Amino acid sequence: MSTVAAISTPVGKGGIAVIRISGDAATEIADRVFLPANKKPLSETEADRAVYGGIFCGKTQIDDGIAVVFKAPRSFTGEDTVEISCHGGVLITKRVLEAVFAAGAHPAGAGEFTKRAFLNGKLSLSEAEAIGGLIDAKTDKYISVSLAQSKGSLGKAVKALSDRLVFLAASVYAFIDYPDEDMTDVSVEEMRKELNSILYRLDELISTHRYGKAISEGVDTAIVGKPNTGKSSLLNMLCGEDRAIVTDIAGTTRDIVTEQVNFGGVLLRLSDTAGIRQTGTDSIVEEIGINKSKKKISDAEVLLAVFDGSMPPSSEDRELMMLLADRREDTVAIVNKTDILEPNSELLAELREKFKGVVKISAKTGEGAERLQMEIEEICGKRNRVSEGEIVTSARQNAALLKARGFIASALESLSLYTQDIASLDIENAVAALDEVDARVASEQIVNEIFSKFCVGK
């Protein structure tokens, strides 16, 4: 592969910027642009040692800085790598990179350094994806999950399942091929028990994906309710700022207000909708807003239904309860205005009858926010008890696990209808599906697609 270079720090004004060069000719190219103060070439400098010196374009010095040489395979990419730190101005950083290109390096593509680390066996694909997660993380939870997975936690969990499946298939084939040898056969009942155990473990991993998606990509969340229940106040509370207009006038919110909020460990893509009330308004604009709100109820993944706790249930409240009847599992019923007085007992009784999650809050003071956070996380799947590093955040990984699950279910069916060797064919396919999680059998197209989402310089 050619030797490539890119700026590995964000483009902009800062204290320092880092230009990374990786490939067989990395130190040779670096020698053409960096002259250590001790006059000893970088190619003769001890690895993993920071060296101060001048940065040149041809014979003209353009900056001074620090260079570090990492020798293969003890580098991030697994190749010879040099990292040059210069002053962090936009123009000077650009000039240093241009000097490196003039000295023989080629521009790195998106995610090329991490891709090379994967191709050189320094990282598995799930570990590489986790590094991307660390860079893109918008929630603290996603950071901790990505950090654990960057150390191989998910890959190890999946490999353990794959090894168990390989042992089953190998035991069957060995007994069939060498019946006269002293080899342990796995009985049908033993195989069924082991496959069911693996299936249970797979289901544990698969069930984490909804929560994994909520902490990484976010979850579409709609705030709904009749006018003046405090929907906009709730949006402002979740955002930590006055994002929506709050008044005592019914119908203030005419269109859907959207905001992305990190609430607890979950990333909420919030929509504050127009108040749903029985049509008697002359405002065409408000009518359109109400229709949009009803459409949002069917589209959102999580619903925050806000009710005025200071009043008994109205006909509009009951209309909303009917609209949400099919979304019971995805709805948190929020009884607002606890700062005014105790919630109405009739309203509470009806809500507890119709919804699993009922939370009393004051959107004005923030009281009840912690309980609301717990209910939202519960809907998003946090109840699963697997370790952080085994939470599946990638749709690609989840698809591979689902495929493996299908083959194992088919193997169990084959055990009931056919023989163990037929079941072993499904087991082999399950192993291949699990191997896709760390891309041991992934196509070049899939690998390229994954790394194309990384920034240049990583």
Image: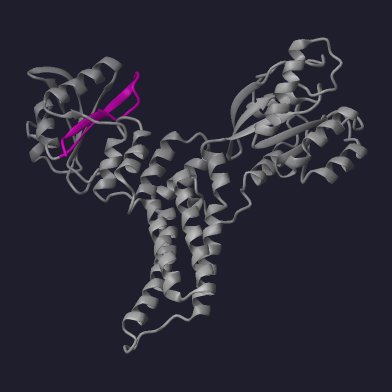
Between 27 and 304, the one nearer to me in the picture: 304
Task: Give the quarter of the image for residue 245.
Answer: top right
Q: Is residue 266 left or right of residue 131?
A: right
Q: Is residue 241 left or right of residue 277?
A: left
Any part of residue 70 in sight: yes
Q: Is residue 89 above or below residue 330?
A: above
Residue 401 percent across, percent down from the top left = 47, 54
Any part of residue 246 in sight: no
Which image quadrant: the C terminus? top left
Task: Give the quarter of the image for residue 435.
Answer: bottom left
Which image quadrant: the N terminus? top left
Residue 109 percent across, percent down from the top left = 27, 31
Between 276 and 31, the one nearer to me in the picture: 276
The residue lying at 47 percent from left, 61 percent from top is 407
The residue lying at 90 percent from left, 29 percent from top is 315
Residue 260 percent across, percent down from the top left = 58, 28
Q: How many marks?
A: 0
Between 311 and 320, the one nearer to me in the picture: 320
Q: Is residue 97 magenta?
A: no
The residue lying at 86 percent from left, 27 percent from top is 316
**Range shown magenta:** 1-23
Q: Is residue 53 left or right of residue 416?
A: left
Task: Give the quarter of the image for residue 319.
Answer: top right
Residue 128 percent across, percent down from the top left = 36, 44
Q: Is residue 22 magenta?
A: yes
